[in-house]
Amino acid sequence: MLTAVEYTLDPEDVCSARLLAIGIRPRMEFSLFAVALAALLGCSVSPWNFEMLPLLIGLTASLGAFRVIQIGRVKLAALDSYRRNPTLRRPTAASWNAGGVTISPAGAAAERIPWQQLRQLRENERILLMLQGASLIHAIPKRAFPDAASLAAFRAFAREHCAKGRP
């Protein structure tokens, strides 16, 4: 069984981790806004027209635009963090066992995180994200795993051990 991976984060990994940590999933949100707008526009040409429809279309479009701006700001902040923090750009090794996860960036102190301190494991199409506290996150790109079976084994192992550590 694979118990360690090596990787180097790129700017998109950091952006993806930051968005996932605060619960933003841009593709899903944009899809929902598109569906809502399409449904409202469909209603506008149907015989079931009502007076508030233009207002609803405008509000939905405005909320979508506001969300795009918010996501853009989060991405810019994540890119700024990536540029400012050289540790994020270093080759990193992550290893795990029943005691926890160790994150070891090259040339920096290794950090050992017991499973009991990890609140949750989240993932999207790009990364696995371990949430340690309110503002502590650890991201491992999925591309670090040699194959889908290794990724699935880590995911199952981490979820099992995170669950054991919770009261």
Image (tube, helix red, strand yellow):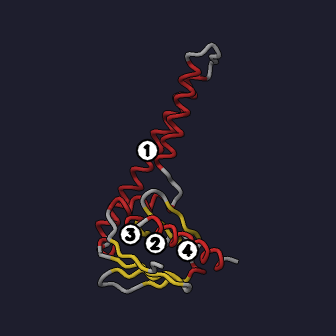
Residue type, numbered disc 3: Pro
Q: Secondary structure at mark 4?
A: helix
What is the x, y in percent for residue 48? Answer: 65, 16
The crowding category of the residue bearing disc 1, from other C-alpha atoms within 10 Å (few below 14, some 14 to 19, many at least 20), is some
- Lower position in the chain sequence, tag 2 or tag 1: 1
For the residue pair 155 and 69, the one nearer the viewer reads as 155
- Lower position in the chain sequence, tag 3 or tag 1: 1
Residue that numbered label 3 is attached to: 146
- Lower position in the chain sequence, tag 3 or tag 2: 2
Residue type, numbered disc 1: Val
Label ID, residue 138: 2
- Which quadrant of the figure has residue 45? top right
Taking the spot 46% from the left edge, 72% from the top edge, the residue there is 138
Q: Left or right: where does residue 154 sit relative to residue 53? A: left
Residue mark closest to the camera, 4 vs 3: 3
Residue mark closest to the camera, 1 vs 4: 4
Residue type, numbered disc 4: Ala
Alpha-carbon distance for marks 4 and 3?
A: 17 Å
Taking the spot 62% from the left edge, 23% from the top edge, the residue there is 52
For the residue pair 20 and 3, the one nearer the viewer reads as 3
Q: Secondary structure at mark 1?
A: helix
Q: Do labels 3 and 2 touch, CB within 8 Å?
A: no
The crowding category of the residue bearing disc 4, from other C-alpha atoms within 10 Å (few below 14, some 14 to 19, many at least 20), is many
Residue that numbered label 4 is attached to: 158
What is the x, y in percent for residue 122? Answer: 53, 64
Q: Do labels 4 and 3 touch, CB within 8 Å?
A: no
